[in-house]
Amino acid sequence: MAVILAVANQKGGVGKTTTAINLGAALAERGRRVLLVDSDPQANLTAALGLPKEAPSTYELLLGDVAAIDLIRSAAGAALPDAVLREGIHGEEPVLDIIPAAPELAGAEIELVSLSERHGRLTAALAMVAPVYDYVFIDCPPSLGLLTLNALAGADGVVAPVQCEYLALEGLSQLLETLRRVREAVNPRLRRLFLLMTMYDARTGLAQSVVEEVRRHFPQIILPTIVPRTVRLGEAPSYGQSVLRYDPSGRGAAAYRALVTELDARIVQETEGTRQPHPTQEMPPVLPVPPRERVTAGAAS
Ligand code: ADP
Ligand code: MG
């Protein structure tokens, strides 16, 4: 059964889409079967893998007009290095699939309100296809509206990219509170949370103090590997490729490969029962101290 992870943070431009694509590609590269679901009306994930932003899309999926199986496209050619595509994984075709989004998906935020089961529609729609995969990543829009709630209502966990910048932690307590509420009211399976630090620029003291701050507050849930800010990671989408394909030996690809090793190991350990997720530690109800002042203070010293 697939592990379903929502890639969420209500801040825009923090690296959600980049993370969904490259975690997915890195897992597919090591033989995991992966489905990426683009659930952002901006359809950046769809475009970044070279697919057209057109109907039918996640919009029809949510409204129940088209079945998931009819929406799935392969993204392996756009996302995986040639050698992986050629040789496959253990002789098998690597699997990296996508359900694309389109701008009309913006209407779903409003139209879903009047529908039954408005939080559970994505879960229901993916139920038939999810068991075929090892991982499903849902790329969320920069809001905590109904599209994100649909992703959370069906997910086993959340990967929240956090930018190594000023005000990085702003909004994180609201995200954590939303996760806690969804877990209590709708989806008790929503137990895993991974903070993934991204766009790290080693030349700035600010980036370092942001990382230290997040490590101090969330030692259990921060993933050890930090994604650097690299030109290649920014360029890859304009070529319709993951960074694993665009720059397979670069620092960006290396970071995402290391992250999936960490992610995969934690999830496999938990599934096998050698490591227990600690819900209360992993998902603190609120941030202990308003992080904004502390990060600023840390950066100034
Ligand atoms: P979100 O989905 O949260 O809005 P994106 O993944 O689209 O964020 O990233 C925002 C922008 O930053 C995009 O142009 C993307 O290519 C770029 N970007 C993301 N991660 C990095 C990185 N580590 N280094 C450089 N540019 C990045
Ligand atoms: Mg995005």
Image (spheres, rainbow, N blue to C red):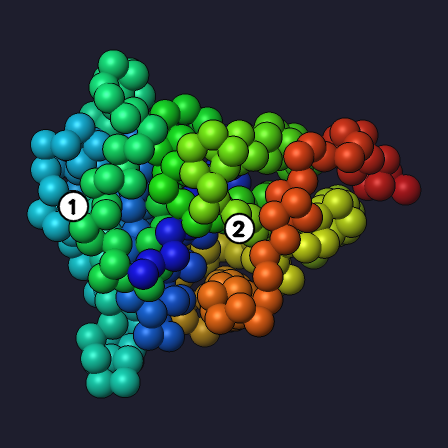
- Could you tell whether 188 is left or right of 106 in the image? right
Which residue occupies 18% across, 59% down?
74
- Dividing the image into 4 quarters, which one contains the C terminus? top right
Please, what secondary structure does the residue beneath circle 2 have? strand
Quarter of the view holding residue 187: top left
Vertical placement of residue 152 versus 205, above or below: above
Q: How far across and down, in percent of the image, does residue 107 sit?
A: 24, 20
Residue carrying label 1: 68
Which residue occupies 33% across, 69% down?
32
Tell me which label, 2 or 1, sits earlier in the chain: 1
Residue carrying label 2: 192
Please, what secondary structure does the residue beneath circle 1 have? helix
Q: How far across and down, in percent of the image, does residue 58 sit?
A: 22, 37
| Cα gap from disc 2 to disc 1, whole angstroms | 25 Å
Which amino acid, by three-letter code, is at mark 2?
Arg
The reply to whether the residue tagged 1 has its Cβ within 8 angstroms of ligand 2 is: no
- Could you tell whether 251 is left or right of 169 in the image? left
Find out whether the residues at labels 2 and 1 contact each other: C-beta distance under 8 Å. no
- Could you tell whether 170 is left or right of 41 in the image? right
Which amino acid, by three-letter code, is at mark 1?
Ala
Vertical placement of residue 101 versus 216, above or below: above
